């Protein structure tokens, strides 16, 4: 059984940081109603373990208040001496500073998923973390939710049928890779689907087929991969990255023509 409180996850930091932003980048005290409510919410997150919850002070109102102090005192505009905090908190401060509206929407979507109970029903997804164990500043739970939605077999089938009815080739919309051309009958009617707009921006509205893009496995992974402070990118943005990085290759030409 652990004897020290586990480090704050990106999901927890997102919720705590959003609270500080909404409080004008000022810390909140232990007795504040918002701190009490956030403490209860953090302790209810799906990944919490009985061992962690049994630790004294784990995500207590005191610990939440201290974390709001980290956010407030390490903001670039703060004039006093900052508290000591880890790199994940500093990354979240940077994200909230540069992309405030987007990050606040992410926090609200996460809260909605917890309050509704929907996130508790979604099982962990195999690749909700990337190859180095990172999840991005939006947190693991929103990534889990997004991947789960993209794997809805009904939506995938309807998207493939729409492409086929239109007379278009069933191929990656970023790099034009065609599974059937490469793998023959094994690759027939195979493609992955990707939400063009992330869950935390689009909200939990009903998914339309135009919200989905057909991607190969590589491009799909790159759209979701955390890099340089961003944890997602649209297929259009990925096409632009390919053109910039490999301007003279056939792969880039295919991406440009898509």
Image (cartoon, rainbow, N blue to C red):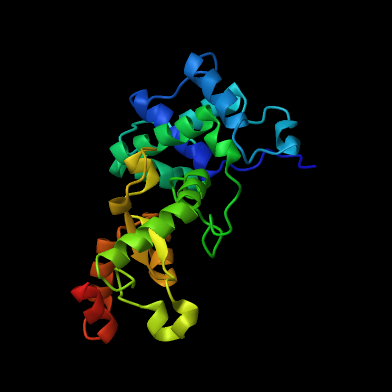
Q: Is residue 3 above or below residue 155?
A: above
Q: Is residue 6 above or below residue 184?
A: above
Number of on-image labels: 0
For the point 59% across and 39% down, which residue is it?
121
- Name the residue at 42% across, 58% down: 156
Query: Where's residue 134, x and y in %?
Result: 52, 56
> Residue reaching furthest front?
165
- Where does the image place residue 131, in percent across and percent down from the top left? 54, 65
Query: Is 117 situated left or right of 73 in this image?
Result: right
Q: Nearer the viewer, residue 36 or 86?
A: 36
Q: Is residue 149 visible?
A: yes
Q: Quadrant of residue 231?
A: bottom left
Q: Quadrant of the N terminus?
A: top right
Does 67 sit left or right of 138 as displayed? right
**Rendered location of residue 35, percent (x, y):** 51, 21
Q: Using the image as rendered, state which of residue 11 and residue 219 is in the foreground.
A: 219
Q: Return the residue nearer the eye: 209 or 125.
A: 209
Tell me which residue sits at (61%, 43%) in the image: 7
Residue, x 30% and y 76% (percent of image)? 176
Q: Is residue 240 left or right of residue 198?
A: left
User: Residue lying farthest left?
Assistant: 257
Identify the image quadrant of residue 212.
bottom left
Let me know if residue 87 appears in the view: no
6 versus 189 height, above or below = above
User: Where, quadrant-wise, is the C terminus in this rendering?
Assistant: bottom left
Please name whichever residue, 58 or 248, is drawn nearer the observer in this view of the structure: 248
Horizontal and vertical percent for residue 47? Answer: 63, 41
């Amino acid at each position: 059984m652990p004897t020290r409180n586990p480090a704050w996850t990106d999901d927890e930091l997102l919720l705590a940081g959003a609270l500080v932003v909404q409080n004008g980048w000022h810390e909140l005290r232990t007795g504040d109603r918002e701190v009490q409510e956030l403490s209860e919410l953090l302790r209810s997150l799906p990944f919490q373990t009985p061992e962690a919850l049994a630790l004294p002070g784990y995500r207590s109102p005191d610990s939440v208040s201290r974390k709001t102090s980290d956010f407030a005192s390490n903001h670039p505009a703060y004039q006093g001496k900052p508290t000591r905090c880890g790199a994940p908190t500093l990354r979240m401060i940077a994200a909230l500073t540069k992309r405030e509206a987007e990050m606040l929407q992410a926090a609200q979507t996460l809260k909605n998923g917890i309050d509704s109970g929907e996130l508790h029903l979604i099982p962990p997804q195999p690749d909700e973390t990337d190859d180095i164990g990172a999840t991005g500043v939006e947190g693991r739970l929103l990534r889990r939710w997004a991947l789960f939605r993209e794997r809805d077999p009904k939506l995938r089938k309807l998207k493939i049928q729409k492409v086929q009815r239109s007379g278009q080739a069933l191929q990656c919309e970023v790099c034009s890779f065609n599974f059937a051309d490469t793998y023959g009958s094994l690759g027939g009617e195979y493609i992955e689907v990707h939400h063009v707009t992330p869950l935390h921006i689009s909200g939990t509205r009903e998914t339309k087929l135009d919200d989905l893009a057909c991607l190969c496995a590589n491009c799909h992974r790159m759209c979701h991969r955390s890099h340089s402070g961003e944890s997602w990118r649209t297929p259009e943005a990925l096409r632009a990255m390919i053109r910039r990085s490999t301007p003279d290759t056939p792969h880039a030409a295919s991406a440009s023509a898509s």
